Image (cartoon, rainbow, N blue to C red):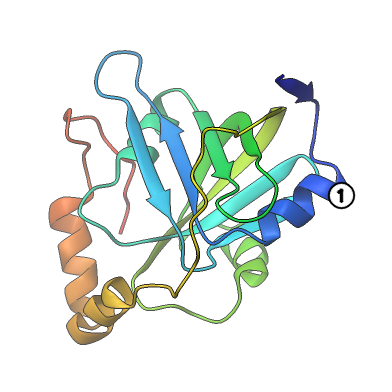
Amino acid sequence: MAKFLPALDERLMAFIRAQHIFFTGSAPANGRVNISPKGLNSFRILSPSQVGYLDLTGSGNETAAHLLENGRMTFMFCAFEGPPLILRLYGKGRSVQKQHPEWPALRAHFGPPVPGERQLIICDINSVQTSCGYGVPELGFRSDRSQLLDWAERKGPEAVDAYRMEKNRSSIDGASTGWEG
């Protein structure tokens, strides 16, 4: 049965830290719902009621557009190994870009620099939900993929910046992402 909590507890924080993949969900008032898988050890727990991830340059920037419009965000973690569990974090998110005053203090939580860093997505949690996860298959982790980091490294910072200016300034529905470069 699903259980709701106001914030993360120690058990759930330990569960999150053990995961290799998480999913983000966001949506505009009108338009497409976006669900994205994320990995590369990019997720951090900033407090029992605040989390975030280091967002890397990709083909779209849907989450940033949706957060700029309404802030609604969901994270989902699934236990693919060990006891079954699905964990959802609901909250209000925002994009923090490199030129924002908060960037240095927040970025310090995410380890060494990574090629292709685009922004931080920070979310204030307003509800935590656990559910059984009995229908989720058991899968074993082999390794992170290196292609995204390799691509950004090969392109170099200037070419990645140009790519973001071309591809990441609006959502697939045409909404602004707030991307400032």
Residues packed near mark 1 inside 10 Å, few (<14), some (14 to 19) or many (20 plus) = few
Helix or strand or loop: what does disc 1 sit on? Answer: helix
Q: Is residue 157 visible?
A: no
Rendering quarter of residue 57:
bottom left
Instruction: Name the residue located 39 percent from the left edge and 49 percent from the top edge.
Output: 37
Furthest-top residue in view? 30
Residue 169 % position (x, y): 22, 46
Amino acid at pointer 1? Glu
Q: Is residue 37 visible?
A: yes
Location of the N terminus by quadrant is top right
11, above or below 73, in the image: below
Residue 175 % position (x, y): 23, 30
Instruction: Name the residue located 55 percent from the left edge and 51 percent from the top edge.
Output: 80
75, above or below 46, in the image: above
Residue 107 % position (x, y): 59, 67
What residue did someone put label 1 on? 10
Task: Say which of 80 and 108 sits in front.
Answer: 80
Q: Is residue 76 left or right of residue 11?
A: left
Q: How many marks?
A: 1
179, above or below 126, in the image: below
Task: Say which of 141 and 180 sits in front.
Answer: 141
Instruction: Name the residue located 64 percent from the left edge and 61 percent from the top edge.
Output: 106
Residue 150 % position (x, y): 27, 82
Furthest-left residue in view? 166
Task: Say which of 113 and 137 sits in front.
Answer: 137
Location of the C terminus by quadrant is bottom left
